[in-house]
Image: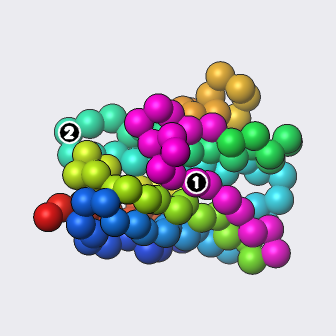
Amino acid sequence: VQLQASGGGFVQPGGSLRLSCTASRSTLNGYSVAWFRQAPGKEREGVACLSDTDGTKYYPHSVKGRFTISRDNAKNTVYLQMGDLKPEDTAVYYCAAGTPILSTRNSPRGYKYWGQGTLVTVSS
């Protein structure tokens, strides 16, 4: 599976962005999907995941209520809708696909396929 992320950019605090991640060479069916981010000097952290088995979504406290993950299987695409953005949301955002177990659903270890990353900058 090859993933291509897009939609990053510059936005002011309080603004919104929608990231997209489209799969090629194979379908996303059968894979759970997730978004991660990595800020300079920090570890990669999960911000949203969507289980393929039961549709369960998980968000860490830092983004809950502001970020929404969704998928369109017909378009082989995963989305991350981000709202009320804050400067601390500035990072490179990565999409991922894989077959994580419950304990790794929000961990990079749970995902085999990765997109190339798209930069989100939140600043006034």
Residue at screen point 31% across, 60% down: 14
- Is 63 contained in the magenta span? yes
Circle 1: residue type: Thr
| Front residue of this view, candidates 112 and 52 | 52
Q: Secondary structure at mark 2?
A: loop
Circle 2: residue type: Gly
Of the two numbered discs 1 and 2 in the rendering, the one whose residue sits closer to the viewer: 1
Contact between marks 1 and 2 (CB within 8 A): the answer is no
Q: Which of the 4 image quadrants contains residue 72?
A: bottom right
In the image, residue 113 sits, relative to residue 109, either above or below, namely below
Q: Earlier in the sequence, mark 1 or mark 2?
A: 2
The reply to whether residue 25 is in sight is no
Q: Secondary structure at mark 1?
A: strand
Q: Is residue 89 left or right of residue 49?
A: left
The residue range painted magenta reads 58-74
Residue at screen point 51% across, 52% down: 67
Which image quarter is the C terminus in? bottom left
In the image, residue 83 sits, relative to residue 4, either above or below, namely above
Give percent across and percent down for residue 57.
68, 42
Disc number placed over residue 85 in the picture, else none = none
Residue under label 2, please give it: 41
Residue under label 1, please give it: 68
| Front residue of this view, candidates 118 and 14 | 14
- Is 44 contained in the magenta span? no
